[in-house]
Image: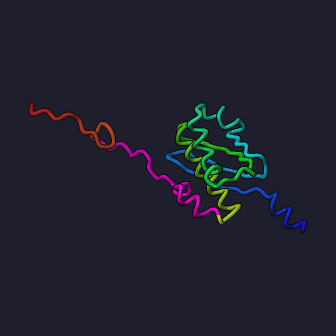
Amino acid sequence: MEILILAEATPNYATGRRKTAVARVRLVPGEGRVTINEKPALQYLGRRVLEMEVLTPFRVAEVRRFDATVKVVGGGVSGQAGAVAHGIARALLESDPNLRPTLKKAGLLTRDSREKERKKYGLKRARKAPQYTKR
């Protein structure tokens, strides 16, 4: 019986990524608080919409019994929010594999692989060519 309690209390770790942002997520039993880089989610992200995006995995899985501690680096605030949501979804999946169909249907387990394309030589941006002139 004691082993079960220890297994329940062990944290679940996962990594989430979006654009150039990488979020390392640690889930521990708690009341559903999310801390990003040692600040509350709303205070760190600055926008309620981004906070809602971060909390989406908890809402979809109908789980409120975990506190998430997140370290996120790289990218902008929006990309970081996406990375945190991805990491939380993966950590929830690690804690309970039965949540997979629910999280998958909501698209939270899919890594959004879109990244900025590199600039090519001879061009002004990745694909924008200099303006053509006849003379």
Quadrant location, the N terminus? bottom right
**Which of the pair 121/25 is nearer the observer?**
25
Residue 112: give x, y in percent of width and height: 48, 52
Looking at the image, residue 49 lies above or below residue 62: above
Q: Residue at x 62, y 57 (%)?
A: 90
Instruction: Find the residue positioned furthest to the front.
Output: 62
Q: Is residue 93 left or right of residue 106?
A: right
Is 32 contained in the magenta span?
Answer: no
Q: Is residue 135 left or right of residue 50?
A: left
Q: Residue at x 60, y 63 (%)?
A: 100
Instruction: Find the residue positioned furthest to the left.
Output: 135
Q: Which residues are magenta?
A: 99-121
Q: Is residue 117 left or right of residue 11?
A: left
Residue 92: give x, y in percent of width and height: 67, 57
Residue 3: give x, y in percent of width and height: 87, 67
Q: Decide whether the magenta segment is chiefly helix, strand or loop.
A: loop
Q: Quadrant of residue 43?
A: top right
